[in-house]
Image (cartoon, rainbow, N blue to C red):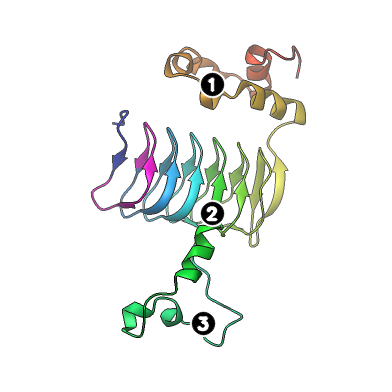
Amino acid sequence: MLNKKPLVHPTAIVIDTVLGDWTEVAARTSIRETVMSDYSYAMNDSHIIYAKIGKFCSIASHTRINPGNHPLDHAALHHFTYRSRQYQLAEDNEEFFNWRRSHKVTIGNDVWIGHGAVVLPGVQIGTGAAIGAGAVVSKDVLPFTVVGGVPAGIIRERFSKNVQEGLKRISWWDWPRKKLRRALSDFRHLSAKDFVKRYDPAISTP
C-alpha cells in the first residue's frame, strides 16, 4: 500500500531524482536526473532520464522517456565516441550528454503514457494527454489530446474545448488530500462535463 513516502521497488534504480509524495517506482525501472511529482507512478521495466513529470501521471511498463540518440551526422554511430571511458579510450564526451540534459522531456499533470511508448528528447506533453501503447512521440502533444502510432499522431481530443478549459481552471491536481477525498465519488461517477459544471467557478454550463 502506498503512503506519503515514495515507494521504490528494491530492484529499481533512482539516481539524482526528486520523487514527490505518494509516488511509486516499480520493479526494474530506472529513473535518473528527473523530477516526478506527487501521486505519479512508473511501472516496471521503464527507463526515464532528464525529465520533468507532473502530478498524477500514469506511466505504464516498458516505456522509454528521453532515450539516447546515436549521432547520425558523425562518421561513427557507435557509442564508443561518447562513452569512451568504457573502452579505455578517453574521458566521456560530456558535450553529448549535456545536449540531452538541455532537451528535457516535460510532462504535464494527469498524463497517461501507455505500455511500451517512447517519448523522444525535448518533447512536451500537455496536461490530460494520453499516449497510446507502443507510440513513438517525436513532437509536442497538446493538453487533453489522445495520440498514437509511429510516429505518434493525433487520434482525438478527449473533451470539448469548454470542458478542457474548465478542467484547467479547476486544476484538481493541485487540490489538497481532503478535497480529493470529498470529491472522490464525483471523480468516479460524473462525466468530465458534469464535473466541470459542479466545480468550475467561472462558468455554469461548459
Residue 66 at least partly seen: no
Q: In the image, what residue type sits under mark 1?
A: Phe
In terms of image quadrants, where is residue 145? top right
Q: Residues within 10 Å of mark 3 (few under 14, many from 20)?
A: few
Q: In the image, what residue type sits under mark 3?
A: Leu
Residue positioned 54% across, 54% down in the render: 104
Question: What is the residue that sits farthest to the bottom in this orientation?
Answer: 75
Taking the image as shown, residue 76 lies to the left or right of residue 92, namely: right
How far apart in space, not on screen, are marks 3 and 2 (Cα)? 22 Å
At mark 1, the secondary structure is helix
Q: Is 14 included in the stretch rendered in magenta?
A: yes
Pick whichever of labels 1 and 2 is earlier in the sequence.
2
Q: Residues within 10 Å of mark 2 (few under 14, many from 20)?
A: many
Q: Which residues are magenta?
A: 9-24
Quadrant the N terminus occupies: top left
x, y percent for residue 131? 59, 48
Quadrant the C terminus occupies: top right
Q: Which residue is mark 2?
A: 104
Residue positioned 47% across, 66% down in the render: 97
Q: Which residue is mark 1?
A: 187
Residue 163 at least partly seen: yes
Nearest-to-viewer mark from 3 and 2: 2
Taking the image as shown, residue 37 lies to the left or right of residue 199, namely: left
Taking the image as shown, residue 203 lies to the left or right of residue 13, namely: right
Between 92 and 49, the residue placed more toward the observer is 92
- Looking at the picture, does residue 29 appear above or below residue 184? below
Between 33 and 14, the residue placed more toward the observer is 33
How far apart in space, not on screen, are marks 3 and 1 (Cα)? 49 Å
Between 34 and 67, the residue placed more toward the observer is 34
Q: Which residue is mark 3?
A: 77
Taking the image as shown, residue 56 lies to the left or right of residue 198, namely: left
